[in-house]
Structure formats: structure tokens, C-alpha cells
Amino acid sequence: MRSEICNHPRIVDAETCLAGCTCGGDHPAPEVTLYSGEDAAQMMAEECRAVYGDRPVLLLFDPETYAVAGADLEQRLLSEKVNLTTHQFDSNPVATAALIDTVRDLDHGMALIISVGSGTINDLGKYSASEDQIDFWCLPTAPSMNGYTSGIAAIKVKGVKRTLPAAPPKRIYARPEVIQNAPLKLRQAGFCDVLAKVVSDIDWQCESLLFSGSYCGLPAAMMTTVEKSYSEHGLEIGRGDESAVMGLFHGLLISGVAMSLAGSSAPASGGEHLVSHFWDMREPLTGREPELHGLQVGVGIILSTACYRRLRELAAEDFPRRGEELFAATAAEIPAIWGPYADEVAKQFQGKRDALIQFNTLLPQKWNELQTLFQQVQSPEYFAELFARTGAPFNLEAFRLTKEEFMLAALNSRAIRERITVLDLAAHAGVLDLAANDALQLLSC
Ligand SMILES: [Zn+2]
Ligand SMILES: [Zn+2]
């Protein structure tokens, strides 16, 4: 039996990691490796047999991912005499605790779980494997989000979406032809998710400057090395050009690695992600089936960049010192917005109450340094135009969001997480309403 040592390159090598660090902290080198090529499924099948021999392997897919890549992989695994069990989820599965139970009932005694798919199927395999200490590999089918390589999985527990720790896959095998031909909407979603880093990194720097000092330049440095291959290529990504779509895919893989290296989702998840979580969490209350993660995040990017632009116009002396009052006003909205989930949300918001009250003194004090950060953010028009360039519509109507639901999220999603983001800065500077209206104009056409 071949050893488990993998010859494929790691997605990011250890030296690159260390070079970009500005915090002096520990960044354990990510282990996940990538094999990319048209023979990736065959390579995966042979290596699966070589590493695991006769030990049982569980293959996960849904009807759509089975059609584009799963059936082919299954045949190859069987030809290599892999001891295979398969499980097909229904179309459009949601990563719920119930489906995790389904997978965990199947994975007893398994040596390996392989997911064929994107966000949800990856999260279901990754989380189950991680909980049951089973190896995990994946064959991605779309460049739709950055979760392939991250150390977290988004699972709905009792109707509330949670971000839970889950070990990233050991190996990823990618077939460019499959990635390239993923549906346009999935490519557009990945494009938005990877570009979120541009704003979330500034959110993190603001928070770090004001409170934690936890910022490290490493994630941003890692992204800078690949950014050019996708950021200016919305049109080509929309057309399905191989180099642009694979550039996007690599950007997403590196973004996930950057999160796991930083030990936090802060580098890739700021205020722009909160609105997406807000709509996911509101599903049981509104009945609106959430749109793809990346697309909702794209809407959040328009809001966040509108906030930064409004903040840029302010001087330190314009800052209203009404921390207590603003906190109380947002907290008062929680019961009506969240119904049965209000207690959980209130607890999160309470977690940053002290920090928000400190805004009264800290923000005017650090205003000049903050301004330097605000200046680095591009305009909402820039991003709206970039996202639309993929050829798919980018507006509230396309994402089945009403103006009311958009405004509700814009003004209140800051309450659902403890993390300080630009939405808190804008709210306490008195410009969140204005920024939300700016974003609404752009998203209504
Ligand atoms: Zn560092
Ligand atoms: Zn994301």
C-alpha cells in the first residue's frame, strides 16, 4: 500500500506563508494539496486505491453533481476496485443537522469520505468526516465559494445557521473542464465571494486598530499574488474562459486557506457577509429560500462599500457620541425581527455592547488612521459594474429580495454577530441609513 504522503503540491507552501506575516504569530502551514488536470478523476481513483486498499470509502453527490462528475468518478473508483459505498442527496440539498446525521449513520468504519460537489456537499462531507475523524477528499464541481479549503462548515442547526469547525480536506482533485462549465450563477457567486476579501480585510484592520490588534497582513498578501488572474476578468468568467475561471477557482482555494491560516474567518468575512447570514437565518420567518451565498455576499459588498464612502466624508468632530442610545435602538428591534430566535441574536449583540460604547471616544481618537483605511476601498458602483459584467443580472429582483427585506438586513444584520464590522462604524457614525439607501439605488436597477 502506498504511503499517505501526497506528491501533489500544497495549495500554499510554508515559505510563502511566513513571508507575508506581519503579526509574528504562529501560522501552521496548510496541508491541503491540489491536483488539477483533465485526468484528475482517474488520478483520484488510483490514489484512493493505493492509499486505502480494501478499506471502505463513502462517495457523496447529488443528482446534478453526479451527472457532471460523480458518475465518471464512481466508474473509475469501481474499476480500481475501491470498496465503495455511495450516497445521493436530493437536488439542492441544504447542510442541515438532519443530513449530517444521515452521513454519519453511513460513515461508520469508513476510511475516507469523498464529496463531489460545491458548497453544501463539501460542508456535509467535511463536517461529518471531521466529527468522526475520517479522512476527507473532494472533487469540486463549481468555483462558487471559498469553503473548499477552509477550516469551517456552515450547518443549519434548529433553523439557525452555524459556522462550525471542520478540518479541511487532505486532497482536492479538480477537473478544469467541470469547473469551467459550472452554471453561470455559480461562477458569479464565486466571483463575489472572493472579492469580499477586499472589503473584509479593511473591516478586520479597522477592528484590529480599535480593539484587538489581531490583524496580520498574511491573508491579504496571499490573495495579492493571485488577484490579477480574476479581479479584472468578470467578462471572461461569465463567458467561461478556462484561464479566467480557473484563476477564480484558485483565488477561492487560497482565500479558504488564508482563513484557516489566520485562525479566524475575519480575513474573508466582514460586514458584507452579515447580510447574507441574516437572510439565511430569516428563511424560517420569511419563507424566502436563500440565494447562493456568494450572491448575497455580493449584495453585502455593495452595502459595505457604500458605508466606507459615507464614512470618508466625515471628520472626527462630526462624530455623534451616542453609543448607548444607538445600541439600545438596534437592540430594541431584535424581538420583532427574530421572533423565536431573538434570544440568541440578543446574546450576540450584547457581546459587543462594551466595544460599541467605547466608539464614543475611540473613533474620534483614531479617526485619521481609520480614514487611511477607508480611502483604500473602491466605490459601490465599481463592484456593481464588475459583478454585472459576468452577464448575469445583479440586483435585488434577481435574488428575490424585496426593498424592505434589504433595508431590514442593512440596518440590523450587525446585531447577529459579535464581530465589529464597518456596519457598526457606519451605524455609530450616523450614516448607515444613508449608505443603505445608496446601495438600494444601485441594486434596484
Ligand atoms: Zn501573522
Ligand atoms: Zn463567503
Image: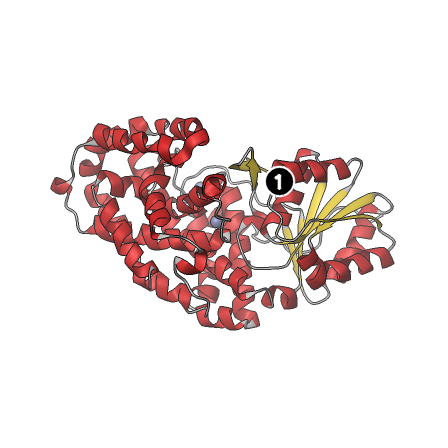
Q: Name the kind of residue labelled 1 in the image.
A: Ala
Find the residue positioned furthest to the left: 317
Residue at the location (64% across, 65% down)? 178
Residue at the location (58% across, 50% down)? 119
Answer left or right for 237 relative to 114: left
Answer left or right for 336 relative to 178: left
Residue 31 visible? The answer is no
| Residue placed most toward the observer, 54 or 272 | 272
Q: Position of residue 262 (x, y in %)?
A: 48, 41
| Residue placed most toward the observer, 124 or 214 | 124
Which quadrant: the C terminus? bottom left
Q: Position of residue 51 (x, y in %)?
A: 80, 48
Tell me where residue 153 sits by quadrant. top right
Vertical comparison of 125 with 173: above or below: above
| Residue placed most toward the observer, 416 or 364 | 416
Tell me where residue 9 sits by quadrant. bottom right
Vertical comparison of 313 with 357: above or below: below
Vertical comparison of 233 with 190: above or below: below
Residue at the location (44% across, 52% down)? 296
Tell me where residue 129 sits by quadrant. top right
Answer left or right for 129 relative to 319: right
Q: Position of residue 144 (x, y in %)?
A: 54, 57
Q: Secondary structure at mark 1?
A: loop
Q: Position of residue 202 (x, y in %)?
A: 34, 48
Question: Which residue bears the numbered disc 1?
Answer: 167
Answer left or right for 48 relative to 268: right
Residue 199 visible? The answer is yes
